[in-house]
């Protein structure tokens, strides 16, 4: 994420949240890794940041899984 503009960061966030909302079941770090073209550590950190901001909720299991929160769904006007 080094030297990325705020717009690029936003686009990645929007992509991860949109795909998480559309995906059936939980979203994995591997899913995020594929969506943002990043390595595992970068993708995990990205998921943790979205979780800390209240957009994703972790299931705390192994392997880690994430679901979009109501806050994330509101960005895309998805009925809860």
Image (cartoon, rainbow, N blue to C red):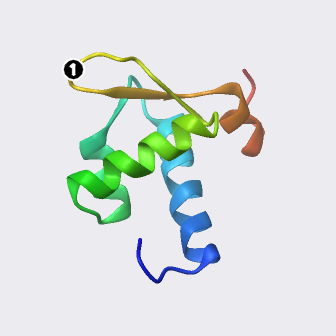
51 to 59, vertically: above or below: below
Count of labels shown? 1
Q: Secondary structure at mark 1?
A: loop
In the shown orientation, is residue 35 left or right of residue 12? Answer: left
Q: Is residue 15 above or below residue 77?
A: below
Q: Nearer the viewer, residue 7 or 2?
A: 2
Category of crowding for the residue at label 1, using alpha-carbon neighbours closer than 10 angstroms: few (below 14), some (14–19), many (at least 20): few
> For the point 38% across and 49% down, which residue is it?
45
User: For the C terminus, which image quadrant?
Assistant: top right
In-image side of 38 versus 14 (left or right): left
At horizontal 39% and vertical 22% (from top left) the residue drawn is: 25
Tell which of 77 and 54 is nearer to you: 54
Q: Provide residue 3's location: percent of width, then percent of height.
A: 46, 83
What residue did someone put label 1 on? 62
Identify the image quadrant of the N terminus.
bottom left
Quarter of the figure with residue 10:
bottom right
Q: Nearer the viewer, residue 47 or 76?
A: 47
Residue 11 horizontal/vertical position (percent)? 57, 66
Q: Position of residue 37 (x, y in %)?
A: 30, 66
Q: Quadrant of residue 44?
A: top left
In the figure, is residue 40 to the left or right of 13? left
Q: Position of residue 35 (x, y in %)?
A: 36, 57
Q: Which residue corresponds to the image point at 48% horizontal and 50% vertical from the top-left?
A: 16
């Amino acid at each position: 994420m080094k030297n990325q503009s705020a717009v690029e960061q936003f686009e990645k966030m929007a992509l991860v949240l949109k795909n998480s909302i559309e995906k059936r079941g939980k979203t994995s770090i591997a899913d995020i890794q594929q969506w943002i073209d990043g390595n595992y550590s970068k993708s995990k950190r990205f998921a943790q940041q979205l979780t800390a901001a209240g957009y994703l909720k972790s299931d705390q299991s192994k392997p880690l899984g994430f679901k979009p929160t109501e806050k994330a769904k509101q960005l895309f006007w998805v009925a809860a």
